[in-house]
Image (cartoon, grey):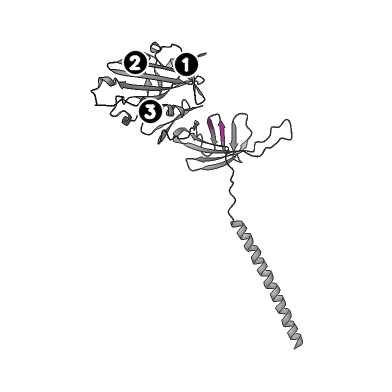
Amino acid sequence: MNTSKNERNTVAIVGLIVIAIVAAYVYKNSLSVSVVKTTPIVSTATPITTANYACGDSLSINASYFTGEANVSTSSSTPPTPTGYVQLSLNDGRSFTLNQTLSADGARYANSDESFVFWSKSNGALVNDTAVSKNYTSCIIVKPDTDALHSVYIYQSTSTNFSIRYPDTFTKNVSYVYQELGPNKDIHGVQFTIDPKIASGTNLSKDSYISVENLPLQTGQTCKAKNFIDIGNLANKNDVVITDRDVEYSFASTTGAGAGNRYEETVYALPYSNPCIAVRYFIHYGVFENYPAGTIKEFNRSDLIGIFDTIRQSLVTN
C-alpha cells in the first residue's frame, strides 16, 4: 500500500509540473501574440515645411518635408549622406514616404528600388514614376489659400510654368489675347474677368479683369512692364521698379478715355522671368457724373484693387 501511495504522489507531482509548463508556454505565447498585434508607434515629428504642388492634367501633390540627424562622412572625398525624408500624398490616392538621396541640385527623394523618385527644386518638382510614366509633370508650388479670396480655384500653366489662385466667381479665359499694341503685337495669356456682382449697380464695367501674360524675350532683352503697355500713354516713358512682399516688379500704368468711359491699366512684370511674365489689371468704368443722380453708386476702387492684389500675390513662377 505504501508503494502504491508513493507512486500516486509521484504521478500527482509530475502532473502538476506538466500543468505548470503548459501554463507557462501558453502565457509566453499569449505575450508574443499581443506584441505582434500592437499598433506601431506613429512618428510625431514636425515637418520643417509643407508644400502643395499643382501638376498637369489637374493632378496635385501634397508634400511634408522632414529633417534627419546629421550624417558626417568618414571620407573627405565622399559627401555626407542626406538623412531627411518627405511624405507625399498624391490626388490619385497613393502616398509615399521617401528618404532623401544624394543630389547635385535641388532635393531628391526616392524609395528603396528607385521606382518612385520625387525631386524638388526651387518652386517646382519632378516625378519619375515607373508605374505611371510621366504622369505628374510640370509640378509647381501653389501658395496657401487666403481669407481675402475666400473660395478659390487654382490655375496652373504647363507652358509658362506658373500657378495662381483666383476666386471661383471669376470667369477664366485661357484663349485670352491682348491686342491693344497694334498689328503683330499680340500678347497671349490667361484672363480672369470679375464676378458680375462686383459691378452690379455701380459705374464699373463687367469686362474688368486681371490677367497673367507672357512675352518671349529677344537676346539681350530684359523683362519690363512697358513691353506690355502703350508707352505713348505713359506719363513716364521709363518703367519703375517696385517691391511688394519681397517680390520685385517692373511697374507701369496708364489711363485712357473715350465716349464717357475710362480705362485704367496697370502692369506688374517679373524682371527676371523668361519668357517675360506680367500681371495686368484692366479696370473699365463709366464717368460717374454722367449717370442720372441716384441711379447707381460709385464702385469701390480700393476693394477691387485689393482683390486684384491678392490674386497677383498668389502667383508662383518657376
Please name the amino acid that badge 1 sits on: Val
Residue corresponding to mark 3 = 303
Residue 240 — which label? 1
Regarding residue 191, the answer to whether it shows in the image is no
Quadrant housing residue 128: top right
Query: Sequence-wise, which precedes: disc 1 or disc 3?
Result: 1
Q: Crowdedness of circle 2 by 10 Å Cα count: few (<14), some, many (20+)?
A: few
Amino acid at circle 2: Gly
C-alpha distance separating marks 2 and 1: 20 Å
Residue projecting furthest to the bottom: 1
Residue 84 place in picture, x, y as percent:
62, 38
Where is the N terminus found, in terms of image quarters?
Answer: bottom right
The kind of secondary structure element at disc 1 is strand
Where is 74 relative to 241, above or below? Answer: below
**Residue visible at 38% across and 19% down in the picture:** 265
Residue range corresponding to the magenta coloring? 118-125
Which residue bears the numbered disc 2?
256
Q: Nearer the viewer, mark 2 or mark 3?
A: 3
Residue 306 falls inside the magenta stretch: no
